[in-house]
Each structure stands twice: as structure tokens, then as C-alpha cells.
């Protein structure tokens, strides 16, 4: 199986461990990822806040590159995934947007490639049974809560992924690799997203609410699939010691990949003492 | 009664966001679910009311439009299917276009710097964004220890990635301005 790969700016920056673990796990599972040539930033929150045209235009240009490459595109970052899906949705639903984009990027959008997040890729394209059959080190004894955040699951009509308020997919993946995915009510609470730099005070309040609830649920760590969420949860929690990991990192551990140690070393809050105490480090 | 200025604001919002504000019957479900409502000066449903009244200046100067985190909780729960985050986007875009300087300037400045970074390089570079933001809004020592830690962990890179054809990106930004 071969897919195009859109890492986005965070995965080439502060979220390198998400990039490395996504690529690593895919290679281990026999999936080839081809990075889109000369991809550009999706515009993220700033694009849709400020610019009526470029908020669609920036992701549309990436979709153009993806259609020219001719393969379905995997997008691990929840924010990039959301923007690419938004552009695809807008161009599909509105002729006026499609025409505007034709003028902007000299390309007629065909809607030929599927946009997939990492959870979808593992669950639908690889299947949990395949994952189970490749388990080397089941994550027995690890209690986690799965934190989906906003951008993967909302708006429903745009992403169409899982459930907007009670998603299950990541919990199922964590269960499949032997961890205990605990029930909790903060799966899709907002972490404050792009306010991290400017209204840090607000982000702290939201993040503390999420971390406190995770502890109350009995979790030892939070698992996520979004670099914005992970960044905020790690950097802005008052506790300062509650681990947060990408689900792909834990997949790597469960698949017995030695490289996963390098990914886990890149965290502001070191998750290796927890994993080590459970005998789960490679 | 809806006067002319209210009609024109309603029409602009409808055109830019695709949302029908008149459908709002102020059940305040959006307010209850909003994670940042407690920090806002005008609750989300009251923004709708102000739009219905045509009180544009108050809306565009509010903190609310810039504090909306676009989490889409409200849009998911709205019984009248109003995607309120899209309305907030439209209002921010109007505020910027009309040069309205309201509350939460730092948030607006950050978004502006983010976009000019993309125009320059085609990609966002975290260190440049943070540096430019500090130069514009102050707070030079904020997060300094965190920054050093992240740099040591290899999470921050001093050299910025650039796409091959930067000229193309600049042209795209110029074209977008012309289209708008």
C-alpha cells in the first residue's frame, strides 16, 4: 500500500516525534508514505480567521499537489487534516468556491483523492486484526484516556470522522494493542488550540481541566493524535509531570520497534519512567 | 424592527459565512458548551443578537470574535444548524478588512504574523513566529525556559524551511487579495 503524505509544519518542527512515529509505524506495517513534493502550510487557525480566500486556497493548493500525485493522502496533524477536509468539502459543495480556486491555483479540483488521518489509516486501511497479529509487546498494565480534541471530529459534515462528542476509534486501537482505554467525558473538550502563545492563561485553565479529569478517570497518561493538543497539554499543565503521548508512539512500542525510544525522548514531559515502570520500554 | 444597516450586516455575514443568523432563537446552547465563554465579553448568542440589531461596531471591537477557539462545539450542538465558528471567522475577516482595532489585539497580531510567515516561506516556522510575536507584543521572557528545554530536546529548529518556489506563493497571496 502506498499513500501520499502531508506532514505539515508542526511535524517538521516541534512535533517531530509524531512525524517520526507515523512514518516508522507505517513502514513497519508495510505502508509506503511518499511526502507530497513542495507542500505548503495549510494556514491553520490563522488562515480561516483572517482570509476568506486563502483559508481554502492554501489547503486547495496542497490537494492539487496530491491529485497530481494520484494517491490518497495521509495527514497525521489534526489541524492540517481539518483544513484539507474543509477545502475539499467547500470545493465539492459550492461551485462558486470551486471556480474561485480555479482562478487562484490554476487547477480544477476533481475530488479524486481521499484525505485520511492516521487513526483512519490504522483502523480502516490496515485493520485492528492485522495490528493484533503483529503485536510484539502488548501494553498490558498501561491505563490511558484517549483525547481526540476538536479538529478530527468536527464539524461532522466536513470531517465525517467518528463521532463529534463521543468518538471510539482511538480507544479501540489502544485496546487492540493491550492498553486499558478508560472511559471519560473529556474526549473532545477543547485545549484552547492556537491561543497557546497569546492567551496562555486561558489555555492553562482548559488544559488543567483535561489533565485533572484524566487523573480522576484513573489514567496514567493521555493519548492523542493532534500536535496542537499534545503541545498544549504538555506545555501548559500545572502538574508538569503527567505524560501525554501520540498514539503512534505507543503503536511503535507495541510493535516492538526499538526506534520508539528515540521518539519518546523528545517530550517536554518524559513518558519513559512510566513506560519503564511497566516494563514496556523497548 | 430591522433597519437598513442591520439588513446589510446580515447579508454580508450570510454571504461570507453561509450562515443564517435569523434562525437563532437564543436558546444559549452555544454559550453553555463554549469552552472559552467565561473569558468572552459578549456571549456567542448575543453576537447573533447584535448582528440582528446591526450593531456592527460593538461586535467588531469585541473580545469574543478573537477568543473563539473554533472548536465547533457550538456548531455541533446548535438546534438551528448555525455554524457559529464560521460567523466568528467572517466577523474577524470584516474587522481586519475595515481596520477595526478592538480587543485581543495580540491574537489578531499573531494570526497576521502567521500568515505573513507563510507568504514569505510557504511554511510556518515556529521560532520565527514566536520571535516576531515577541517583537510586536512584548513579553520577551515569557516561556524562555520552556523554549530552551524544547530547543535542547531538538523540537525547535533555528533554520526555517522554505518551499522551492517562494515566488509562486507570493503570487498566490497577491491573487487572493485581488479575488477578494
Image (tube, coloured by chain):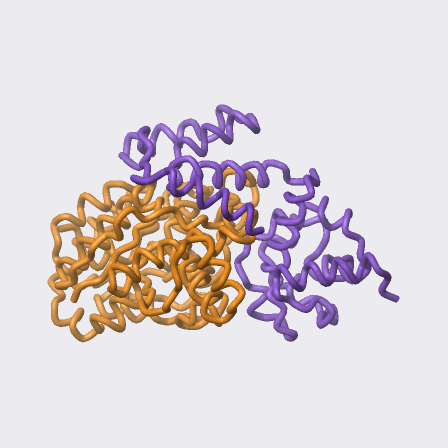
Residue at (63% x, 49% y) in the render:
B92
A43 vs B177, left or right, is left
**Can you tell which quarter of the image residue A248 is in?**
bottom left
Residue A224 in view (yes/no): no
**Front position in the image: A161 or A7:** A7
Vertical placement of B13 versus B99: above or below? below
**Front position in the image: A211 or A17:** A17
**Front position in the image: B3 or B145:** B3
Residue A109 in view (yes/no): yes
Question: How far from the left and from the top, in percent, is residue B136?
Answer: 55, 27
Residue at (67% x, 64% y) in the render:
B14
Question: What tint does the image give chain A?
Answer: orange
Question: How far from the left and from the top, in percent, is residue B46?
Answer: 74, 59
**Can you tell which quarter of the image residue B54 is in?**
bottom right
The chain coloured purple is B
- Please identify the residue farthest to the right as the structure is shown: B1
Vertical placement of B88 versus B163: above or below? below
Q: Quadrant of the N terminus of chain A?
A: bottom left
Across the whole image, how many numbered discs are drawn on residues?
A: 0
Vertical placement of A75 versus A207: above or below? below
Residue at (69% x, 38% y) in the render:
B101
Question: How far from the left and from the top, in percent, is residue B33?
Answer: 60, 63
Question: How far from the left and from the top, in percent, is residue B61?
Answer: 72, 44
Vertical placement of A271 versus A149: above or below? above
B34 vs A109, left or right, is right
**Front position in the image: A246 or A87:** A87
Amino acid at each position: 500500500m502506498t499513500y501520499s503524505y502531508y506532514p505539515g509544519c508542526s511535524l517538521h518542527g516541534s512535533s517531530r516525534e509524531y512525524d517520526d512515529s507515523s512514518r516508522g509505524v507505517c513502514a513497519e506495517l508495510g505502508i509506503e508514505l511518499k511526502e507530497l513534493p513542495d507542500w505548503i502550510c495549510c494556514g491553520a487557525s490563522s488562515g480561516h480567521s483572517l482570509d476568506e480566500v486563502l483559508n481554502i486556497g492554501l489547503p486547495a493548493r496542497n490537494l492539487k499537489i496530491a491529485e497530481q500525485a494520484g494517491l490518497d493522502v495521509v495527514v497525521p496533524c489534526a489541524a492540517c487534516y481539518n483544513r484539507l477536509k474543509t477545502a475539499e468539502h467547500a470545493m465539492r459543495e459550492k461551485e462558486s468556491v470551486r471556480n474561485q480556486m480555479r482562478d487562484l491555483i490554476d487547477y480544477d479540483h476533481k475530488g479524486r483523492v481521499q484525505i485520511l488521518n492516521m487513526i483512519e489509516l490504522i483502523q480502516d486501511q490496515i485493520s485492528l486484526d492485522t495490528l493484533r497479529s503483529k503485536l510484539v509487546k502488548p501494553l498490558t498494565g498501561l491505563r490511558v484516556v484517549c483525547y481526540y480534541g476538536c479538529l478530527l471530529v468536527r464539524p461532522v459534515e466536513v470531517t465525517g470522522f467518528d463521532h463529534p462528542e463521543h468518538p471510539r476509534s482511538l480507544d479501540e486501537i489502544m485496546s487492540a494493542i493491550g492498553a486499558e482505554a478508560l472511559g471519560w467525558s473529556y474526549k473532545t473538550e477543547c485545549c484552547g488550540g492556537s491561543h497557546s502563545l497569546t492567551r496562555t492563561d486561558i489555555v492553562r485553565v482548559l488544559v488543567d481541566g483535561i489533565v485533572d479529569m484524566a487523573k480522576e478517570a484513573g489514567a496514567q497518561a493521555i493519548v492523542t493524535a493532534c500536535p496542537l493538543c499534545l503541545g498544549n497539554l504538555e506545555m501548559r499543565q500545572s502538574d508538569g509531570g503527567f505524560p501525554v503521548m501520540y498514539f503512534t508512539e505507543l503503536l511503535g512500542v507495541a510493535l516492538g520497534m526499538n526506534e520508539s525510544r528515540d521518539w519518546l525522548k523528545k517530550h517536554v514531559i518524559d513518558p519513559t519512567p512510566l513506560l519503564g515502570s511497566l516494563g514496556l520500554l523497548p | 424592527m430591522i433597519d437598513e444597516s442591520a439588513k446589510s450586516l446580515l447579508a454580508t455575514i450570510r454571504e461570507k459565512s453561509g450562515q443564517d443568523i435569523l434562525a437563532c432563537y437564543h436558546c444559549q446552547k452555544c454559550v453553555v458548551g463554549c469552552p472559552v465563554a467565561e473569558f468572552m465579553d459578549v456571549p456567542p448568542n448575543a453576537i447573533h443578537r447584535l448582528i440582528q440589531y446591526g450593531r456592527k461596531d460593538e461586535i467588531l471591537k469585541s473580545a469574543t470574535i478573537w477568543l473563539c477557539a473554533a472548536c465547533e462545539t457550538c456548531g455541533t450542538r446548535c438546534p438551528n444548524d448555525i455554524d457559529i465558528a464560521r460567523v466568528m471567522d467572517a466577523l474577524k475577516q470584516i474587522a481586519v478588512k475595515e481596520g477595526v482595532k478592538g480587543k485581543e489585539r495580540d491574537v489578531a497580531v499573531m494570526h497576521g504574523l502567521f500568515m505573513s510567515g507563510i507568504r514569505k516561506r510557504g511554511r510556518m516556522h515556529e521560532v520565527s513566529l514566536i520571535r516576531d510575536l515577541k517583537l510586536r507584543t512584548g513579553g520577551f521572557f515569557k516561556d524562555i525556559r520552556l523554549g530552551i528545554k524544547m530547543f535542547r530536546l531538538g523540537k525547535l529548529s533555528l533554520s526555517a524551511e522554505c518551499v522551492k518556489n517562494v515566488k509562486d506563493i507570493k503570487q498566490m497571496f497577491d491573487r487572493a487579495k485581488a479575488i477578494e
